[in-house]
Image (tube, rainbow, N blue to C red):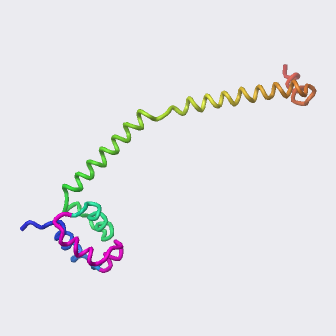
Amino acid sequence: MNLNVGQVIEHVVRKDHMGITELSRKLHVSRRTIYNWFDQESLNFDIICKIGNVMNHDFSEEFPDDFARLRDEARAKKNALMDTEDNSTPNYSGAVNYWMNKYIQLLEKYNELLSQRYPNTYLDKEMMSEE
């Protein structure tokens, strides 16, 4: 006897202590929706995962092909993301060095202008004594 997806889910739900009323409340759907899912030959994989999460049940035993496909898709997305990051990650260390040097140059210029504007300051005398 070949069971459809809805029948498999119904079997798991009825074995569980939670009950259909509590399941429908936690999924924010009506009891009628749950019963309609039981009649479906196929069901959206997201719905199966949501039911499993609410019931704390791993449906990977009942639907190994769907979970294997999901795992493969997740790996492919992760690899694509890693490839994208490797190729498009900017080199921030060069930017940091650029701005650090720019900041130091501006400070030096500022100090030079201050010493020209206020030649008899303590800072200027201290610098002269070091020379």
Q: Position of residue 57 (x, y in %)?
A: 27, 67
Q: Position of residue 56 (x, y in %)?
A: 31, 68
Q: Quadrant of residue 66?
A: bottom left
Q: Quadrant of residue 22?
A: bottom left
User: Is 48 placed above or below 88 here?
Assistant: below
Magenta stretch holds residue 112 = no
Magenta range is 21-42
Assign the C terminus to one quadrant of the image.
Answer: top right
Query: Which residue corresponds to the image point at 22% horizontal and 73% vertical from the top-left?
Result: 36
Magenta stretch holds residue 34 = yes
Q: Quadrant of residue 122?
A: top right
Question: Is the stretch drawn in magenta largely helix, strand or loop?
Answer: helix
Query: Which residue corresponds to the image point at 28% horizontal and 78% vertical from the top-left?
Result: 31
- State the residue lying farthest toward the top: 131
User: Is 18 placed above or below 130 here?
Assistant: below
Assign the N terminus to one quadrant of the image.
Answer: bottom left
User: Is 78 placed above or below 100 here?
Assistant: below
Number of callouts: 0
User: Is 35 placed above or below 87 here?
Assistant: below
Asked if residue 34 lies left or right of residue 91, the reply is left
Query: Which residue corresponds to the image point at 31% horizontal and 49% vertical from the top-left?
Result: 74
Asked if residue 40 lies left or right of residue 30, the reply is left
- State the residue lying farthest toward the right: 120
Asked if residue 27 lies left or right of residue 92, the reply is left
Q: Nearer the viewer, residue 66 or 97?
A: 66
Q: Position of residue 64 (x, y in %)?
A: 19, 57
Q: Nearer the viewer, residue 7 or 131?
A: 7
Q: Position of residue 95 (x, y in %)?
A: 58, 31
Query: Which residue corresponds to the image point at 20% horizontal and 61% vertical from the top-left?
Result: 61
